Image: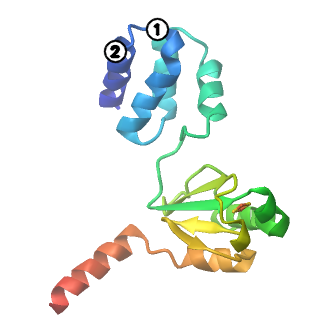
Amino acid sequence: MEQETKFVQEIVERYDGDAGMLIPMMQDIQVEYGYLSAEQLRRLAKQLDVPLMRVYGVATFYSSFRLAPKGQHEVTLCMGTVCYLKGAGRISEVICDEFQVEPGGTTADRLFSFQPVNCVGACALAPVMIVDGKYYDGVTPASAIDILHSLPSEEETVEEAESYGKDK
Ligand code: FES
């Protein structure tokens, strides 16, 4: 925590405390930590003497900012027009429901981050879901849930690697 506070201070100093440089400051913090924590945003607002609401306004306006740590897996769901017309809205709803995750958020166990996005340029395959860079086409609510339930957690990956090492 103290280290985070110090880092925010360093960033503010890097930009001479110029509140007009809020976005680059937030980008730098995100590069370092992978996301923007509530404490970092609070510190930033305090150090720059700007309302916290303004900092949150920027953080939530730009989809490139994350307010939660990244999950072990990256799940992207296309919400472009074609995918949407083929049921992407419903798929998003069932994912959020099943895994108690918000669009743009990360599951509580940090298994995956869920990001609905605009057209990913594969409309012929709609609806499209991308998991760690792998494209799944013609996804349905049920198949999306199955795919996500089959994602290995970090512990499983470590166990697999260990048992593989033992076999050798
Ligand atoms: S609308 Fe989904 S890939 Fe184009």
Secondary structure at badge 2 equals helix
Q: Total marks drawn?
A: 2
- Displayed quadrant of residue 56: top right
> Residue 150: x percent and y percent?
53, 79
Tell me the residue that label 1 is attached to. 18
Colour style of the rendered protein structure: rainbow
Task: Give the numbered dot on residue 144.
Answer: none
**Residue at screen point 63% across, 67% down:** 129
Tell me the residue that label 2 is attached to. 14
**Residue at screen point 58% across, 77% down:** 147
Kind of residue at badge 2: Arg
Name, please, the residue furthest toward the left: 168
Q: Is residue 61 visible?
A: yes
Name, please, the residue furthest toward the right: 85
> Residue 60: x percent and y percent?
64, 34
Q: Is residue 57 left or right of residue 42?
A: right
Kind of residue at badge 1: Asp
Q: CA distance from mark 2 to mark 1?
A: 9 Å
- The quarter of the rendered structure image containing the C terminus is bottom left
**Mark 1 neighbour class, 10 Å CA radius: few under 14, some 14 to 19, many 20 or more:** few
**Mark 2 neighbour class, 10 Å CA radius: few under 14, some 14 to 19, many 20 or more:** few
Q: Where 143 sits versus 96, above or below?
A: below
